[in-house]
Amino acid sequence: MATRDKKPARSNRLPDRDELLAYIRENQGESVRRDIARAFGVRGAKRAELRAMLRELEDAGLIERSEGRKWRPSDRLPPVAVLEVYDLDSDGDPLLRPTSWDADQPPPAIELRAGPRNMAAPGIGDRILCRLQPRSDNGYTATPMRRVGAQAQTIIGVYRQAGDGGRLTSTERRARHEMFVASDDTGDAQDGELVVAELLSGRRNGLARAKITERIGDASEPAAISLIAIHRAGIPIEFPQSVIDAADAATPPSLGKRADLRDVALVTIDGADARDFDDAVFAEPDNDAENQGGWHLIVAIADVACFVRPDSVLDREAYRRGNSVYFPDRVVPMLPAALSNGLCSLVPDEDRACFAVDLWINADGSLLRHRFRRALMKSAARLTYEQVEATRKDGDAPVPAAIIDNLYRAFDSLSRERERRGTLELDLPERKVVLDEAGVVRAIAPVERLDSHRLIEEFMITANVRRRPRDDPPAPTGDVPRSRRTGPGKNPGAARGPSRIRRKITEGENIPRHRLQCAAR
């Protein structure tokens, strides 16, 4: 029997759609229309409106009739529904679920057919209006009709419990009005929690209605500021399981055809609070008798392409994120931790795949020649800017002093070349948020600009300005993607003219206008 009191209520008001569904779910298989009308105090002409509401829910596939003219929740999906892509399988095919689906319940198997020609392949988070056809295996075949332009409007706010459900106050200063959250829509949120909510249609007690879709954390915690910024900007925090699985399946590379730099004293130099180490440097005097006072430099970066293959689930997820995002108390990485903090981080004493450039400069810092190659390296040390600077001043080195001394002497040569070019120096002030152990902001302090900062910048600039498509080394195993590829049927030499034009522009030569127009074509 129904669990609600069947005595007629005096209000004689129609329940809204969500209230009606909640009642039928609570009284599964036992809801007769007469009992529903009594529970909500619906009388007279409004009973016909209630009957129409029940038919609408039946047509939408949300409820169905059982024996004895009783209503019960329906397990089937409606013939037309809005589906969202919540993940990708191991083959890169989209996994779908209805937008109203309970995230804690496993969704039905839905196979997506090809859409119209002008419809691009859907990605994670996309919503599609589909026509659904049940299958014999209790799954569905979905035929795309059109994309649904925008997702339901969401807000971030602080939830407060109340007797009839709860209230939600937005974190936006321009929208501090309260919203009503029904007891069935709280998502088990606790009083004072920071939550993400979806705005619903209609009003309750004069308040806009909202449904909590995600619990973020305690609004009083210091980390709440970063969490609000992350959710407000729509920065994805969680990785789809398929992406995590692909990262976990990656294995350390073998030497193969890579150059072996594991005996070279490459070191990483980063801030004290750096969470990943993606570049390393080395310098030694050039042993070429014709280059007295010259230097041989090596700049190496993590070879991410060794693990992130074109159009793989990792590649698509990295493209969706664009970059890692840094906050005072956390980092939201572009790749899962198995790669960003593991195989793609140049941690000390571990074999790591890298992309390296050898640079030979003379005593005045002019570049004589260079060579790019894929290699296997082993970082000799993880150093901070402050450590390197202190070593130069007092000689207390965490590594052999010659390693750091050579870096600074090579930097001095590069600095002379920089001065000769008349490069603009922009030492702009920088601030750093200082947190205590509890994550509370204690100060916003200026960052001291050190020569060790300039050293790394100069090494990186020297490596990058010489980076050209023709410098790509061959893939060592035949399957590592190149940085530049030529499409089928295209002439590999066709780009040489524009490349010469770009080189001349870089070197400061004047190019006739007609040559630029030809290059553009």
Image (cartoon, rainbow, N blue to C red):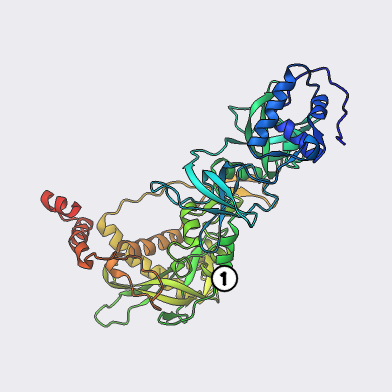
**Can residue 177 be seen?**
no
Amino acid type of the residue that numbered disc 1 sits on in the rendered structure: Ala
Image-based side of 179 in relation to 246, left or right: right
Q: Is residue 47 above or below residue 146?
A: above
- 128 to the left or right of 257: right
Q: Quadrant of residue 485?
A: bottom left
Q: Position of residue 15 (x, y in %)?
A: 73, 26
Residue ID for mark 1? 249
- Residue 315, relative to residue 4: is it above or below? below
Q: Is residue 131 left or right of residue 188?
A: left
Indicate the position of residue 499 as horizontal and vertical percent values.
22, 61
On the question of residue 248 being in view, the answer is yes
- Residue 190, position as x, y percentages in the image: 77, 40
Depth check: give the residue in front, 302 or 97.
97
Question: Quadrant where the N terminus lies?
Answer: top right
In the rendered image, residue 513, in percent from the top left (x then y), is placed at 12, 49
Q: Secondary structure at mark 1?
A: loop
